[in-house]
Amino acid sequence: MKSSVRLYILVTVLVSLWCIGILAAPILKHVGWTQSADILYSFFARVCHQDDARSFHIEGDKIGVCIRCSAIYFGFFLGLITLPLLRMLKRKNLLAMRFFLFAVLPMVIDVALNITGIHASTPMTRVITGALFGMSMPWFVIPIFIEACLQLNPRNKKHSSESGVVPYARKAQ
Amino acid sequence: MLEKPSKLRAALLGGLIVGTISGLPGLNLLNCCCCAGILFGGAMSVYLYRREFTDEMPPMESSDALILGIIAGIIGALVTTILSTMISLILGPVEIEMVRNFVEKFGEKLENSGSLPPGTMDDLREKLEVAMKESGKIGGILRSLVYALILYPIFSMLGGLIGYGIFGKKKPTIPPKPPIQQ
C-alpha cells in the first residue's frame, strides 16, 4: 500500500473518531455514563460554545458541539471520503485557493451578519455555510498534509521523484 | 546555496499569537468559530517564516508549514494556560466581573435583535458560574492544559497548512533588464 493511501486512511480514522465523539456525548449521558459524557463535553467545550439552543439534540441532550461546528466537522468528514473519488490525494490535483476562499466567505458573512444584528442566522444557514466550509477544507488541506508527511519521511526525500512529492514553491516557479 | 532559516522565531511568534487570542478574555470568543484564533496563529507563523526566505535559500516546503503549525500550537497551549492562570490569579473576581458585564451587555443586544435564541443568556450565566468555581484550581488548570496540548497543535497545524497554501507560493524573481545600448 502506498504511503499516501496509508496516511489518508489514518486521517480518515482520526476524523471519524472525532465525529463519533461528538455524537457519543449525549448517547453516553442517556445511557447513564455521565462521567464519560462530561469528559467529552468538557473536551469539546474547548472548541465550541456548546449553546443548548444552537445545538442538535439526541435523546433530549445536546451533541458535543453546536450546529455550525457539527456541520463543519461532518462536512470535513464527507469532504475527506470524497477525496479519492475526486483524485485529489496528490498535491498537483489540488483545488485552487480561490475556491477555498469562496467556500469560507458564506460562513464569514453569516457570522458577521449575525454578530452585527443585521440578520439572525438560522439552523439552515449554519448547516449550509458550515458544511460548505467543512467540505472544502480537506480538498485543500489534506493533499498538502500528505505531501508534508511524505517529505518528512527520509526515504521519500531520497526518492522524491518516484513518490511524486514535489515541493509546492518549486513547482510554482 | 544557503540553508533554510530557523523555525524557532516564527513558531514562537505564532504561538504567542495563538496564546494571546486564546488566553485573553473576550478575545478568546474568536475560538468559538471553529478555533479561528488558533488557525490564524498557525497561518501567521507560516507567513512570518516565509518572510525570512531569500532567493539564495532552498524553497519553503509543506513539511516546514506542518512542523511550524504544530510547534506554534504547543507554544500557544502553554502560553494560553499560563496567561489565563495569571489573569485569574491576579485579577480574579475583577476579570470574571468584566466578562460578566460584557456578556450581559452584548448578549442582551443580540437577544433583542433576535440573533440569540431565548434561554441562551441563562446558559451563559450558568457557564460563567462554573468557570468561576473552576478557575484557579490546580486540577482545572492541568485539565485545560492537557486539552489544549491535544487540540491546539491540531488546529494550529491546519492553520499552518492553509497558510502554506496562501503564502507558500514563491514569487518568480524578475531578472534585471539589460542596459539599453545607444
Image (cartoon, rainbow, N blue to C red):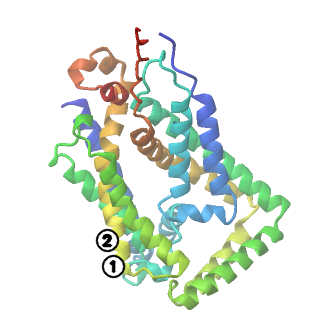
Q: Secondary structure at mark 2?
A: helix
* CB atoms of marks 1 and 2 within 8 Å: yes
Using the image, determine if residue A73 lies above or below residue A81. Answer: below
Using the image as rendered, state which of residue A134 and residue A37 is in the foreground. Answer: A134
* Number of disc labels: 2
Q: Residue furthest left?
A: A85
Circle 2 sits on which residue?
A128
Q: Chain of mark 1?
A: A
Q: Chain of mark 2?
A: A
Q: Position of residue A58 (x, y in %)?
A: 36, 79
Label 1 belongs to which residue?
A124
Left or right of residue B98, residue A169 in this image: left
Q: Position of residue A104 (x, y in %)?
A: 38, 60
Q: Residue at x 16, y 48 (%)?
A: A86
Closer-to-camera residue (B34/B124): B34
Q: Amino acid at mark 1?
A: Met
Q: Position of residue A72 (x, y in %)?
A: 37, 63
Q: Quick check: can you spot residue A41? A: yes
The amino acid type of the residue labelled 2 equals Ile
Local packing at callout 1 (Cα closer than 10 Å; few below 14, some 14-19, many 20+) is few
> Foreground: A12 or A27?
A12
